[in-house]
Amino acid sequence: MKAVQIYKFGGVNELKYEDAPKPEIKSDEVLIKVYATSINPVDWKVREGHMPGSDKRTFPIILGWDVSGIIEMAGLNVNGFKKGDAVYARPNVSRNGTYAEYVAVNAGEIALKPTSIDHIHSAAVPLAGLTAWQGLFDHGKLESGQKVLIHAAAGGVGTYAVQLAKWKGAYVIGTASEQNLDFLKKLGVDEVIDYKNEAFESKLKDLDLVFDLVGGDTQKKSLDVLKPGGILVSTVGLRDEAAIKEKGMIGAQFMAQSSPGDLTSLAKLIDEGKLKPIIAEVLTLPQAAEAQQKSEAGHTRGKIVLKVAQ
């Protein structure tokens, strides 16, 4: 099969599009013919060797941890899925990934893809959609009527978080650059803030939840807008846990976990027309390095997808 691999940690020049062995599956796994995958920050963090457990990896490594495709083969102990099923998943990040024509995935990590959208759009959902769902609902405990601030609301995770928070019945505030403000209003954001020209910490107060996808000073300032007992959820680590406790708030940091149940819930909302993937650009597998460069530079509206199969 064709795949994009790295032989050492480093920059995008380490990505090699080449022939690679087709994966073999265990009895509890499925072999998925990859129709599309998408780009996430974890891709280049693994590429650069910055992810926990990097020292235990063996080269070559295939990056990519979103997939939408068709089951080519199911292991003997796999129940509920069969050859020909259209599925999507966020596979285990510690294993070889989805910048490839085929990927082996544990059957406990997959779900049937949404029926109303194609593989290109389905591939944009798993990691970012799971991050938004689990961040808002599992860690953020978001309820109808609450107020939530979503940083980087126009990004890959942010666009899902906005739609899911609105679906839940929350009042949604989003930060973004000026060129994305109108886009966010159309997406459903109740209040938009241009983070380059407006100080959100002086405009907001008594919020129930801040979903921080940025970190740094943005996270520090976010403590000033939460009410006592409010929750700060971050995908980039907690900068000052002592300050969070001192202010009587709750802090949670996490990385999205594989969850067929959550993927099924996301697929249901998509098929009901209540959630839609936002795609900035579709490239091909040989363009993986270009795609990573664009994503890593930031300011991408939604997701960049790699089309793998025709």
Image (tube, grey):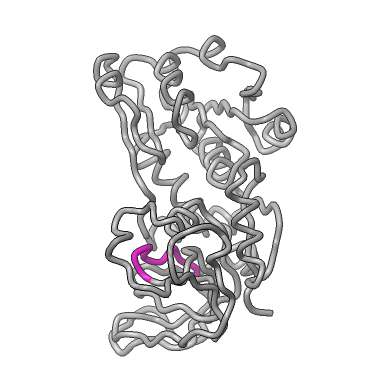
Q: Residue at x 46, y 87 (%)?
A: 21
Query: Where is residue 237 drawn, in percent x and y?
Result: 36, 37
In the drawing, does residue 180 fall left or right of residue 245?
A: right
Quadrant of the snapshot with the C terminus? bottom right
Query: Where is residue 119 drawn, in percent x and y?
Result: 62, 69
Residue 68 in which image quadrant? bottom right
Q: Residue at x 32, y 67 (%)?
A: 57
Asked if 117 appears above or below 265 in the picture, the reply is below
In the drawing, does residue 82 fall left or right of residue 26?
A: right
User: Closer to the camera, 202 or 41?
Assistant: 41
The answer to whether residue 146 of the structure is visible from this angle is no
**Magenta extent:** 88-95
Query: Where is residue 301 drawn, in percent x and y?
Result: 66, 44
Q: Is residue 35 magenta?
A: no
Decide whether the magenta segment is chiefly helix, strand or loop: loop
Residue 31 in which image quadrant? bottom left
Query: Where is residue 163 drawn, in percent x and y?
Result: 57, 41
Quadrant of the snapshot with the N terminus? bottom right
Asked if 124 appears above or below 245 in the picture, the reply is below
Q: Residue at x 34, y 43 (%)?
A: 254
User: Closer to the camera, 299 or 51?
Assistant: 51
User: Closer to the camera, 176 or 262?
Assistant: 176
Asked if 298 appears above or below 223 in the picture, the reply is below
Q: Name, please, the residue furthest toward the top.
A: 202
The answer to whether residue 230 of the structure is visible from this angle is yes
